[in-house]
Amino acid sequence: MTGTAQRETPNVGIFWLAQTTDGEARLLASGCPLDQAELYGDCLTYGPGRYETWAEWRGDRTVDPALRAIVRSYEYEDWPRGRIFFDRARDLFVLYADRKLMTPEMIAHIETRFHLPAERTEIHSGIHYQSTETPNVLATRATRRRRSVESERLSGPTISNELVWHRQNPVLGEGRVHC
């Protein structure tokens, strides 16, 4: 043994950030390694969809009771969510998520959960990932950001690291399969 930990296998999958009844924010995730992923155009993706996964968790009595309470009380599109797929043509993981999740801390948490190599991961917000619910942990950050913007108007511009790290969506060429 060389003393360095072996790197975990990256996964593709789906995820949500939801809040339990006691106010705890939880990253709910389901995924698989690339060798178990489904082929979709030029991409590898996690086969089961959000609806199927949510329904499975609702009916599975072995699932954590706090998770079951969430999935029984809400629909899958209520909480901030996203998807990770692998673009084989570009040898790149692509993470799409609700804009509410676009903080460096949350992206790092998702990348860690799915064992994604940061240098081979592209991050995008997607219009179809908009949610109605906001876990308190995100609402608190949004409130701090709003206050920061309000104080900026009064005191002059400041530079926010949260705004700098987000990468813009590239334009997809014609004929390219979008996963």
Image (tube, rainbow, N blue to C red):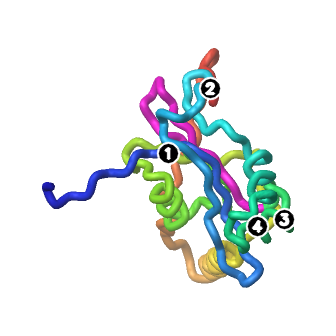
Q: Quadrant of residue 134?
A: bottom right
Determine whether the residue tagged by mark 1 lies in a helix, strand or loop: strand
The residue stretch that appears in magenta: 79-94
User: Eyeballing the image, is 98 above or below 134?
Assistant: above
Q: CA distance from mark 4 to mark 1?
A: 23 Å
Q: Which residue is mark 3?
A: 72
Q: Earlier in the sequence, mark 1 or mark 2?
A: 1
Q: Which residue lies under the disc numbered 4?
A: 68
**Rendered image: mark on residue 11:** 1
Left or right of residue 71: residue 168: left
Q: Nearer the viewer, mark 1 or mark 3?
A: 3
If you read the primary sequence from the N terminus, does the residue marked by circle 2 or circle 4 appear first?
2
**Which residue carries the number 2 mark?**
40
Residue 26 in picture, x, y percent from top left: 64, 70
* Left or right relative to 56: residue 8: left
- Up-down: is 104 above or below 48? below
**Please, what is the three-letter code of the amino acid marked with disc 4?**
Arg
Q: Earlier in the sequence, mark 2 or mark 3?
A: 2
Judge the density around disc 1: few (<14), some (14-19), many (≥20) Cα neighbours within 10 Å.
Answer: many
Q: On the rendered image, what quadrant is the C terminus found in?
A: top right
CA neighbours of label 4 inside 10 A, class few (<14), some (14 to 19), many (20+): some
Is 108 positioned to the left or the right of 3 in the image? right
Q: Between residues 173 and 16, which one lies in front from this camera angle? A: 16
Q: Nearer the viewer, residue 32 or 171?
A: 32
Tell me if residue 73 comes above or below residue 41 in the rendering.
below
Secondary structure of the residue carrying numbered label 3: helix
Three-letter code, disc 3: Arg
- Name the residue at 69% across, 64% down: 63
Residue 174, given in percent of the width and then of the height, sits at 63, 17
Question: Which of the image's four quarters has the N terminus?
Answer: bottom left
Residue 126 visible somewhere in the drawing: yes
Q: Residue 105: x percent and y percent?
A: 50, 67
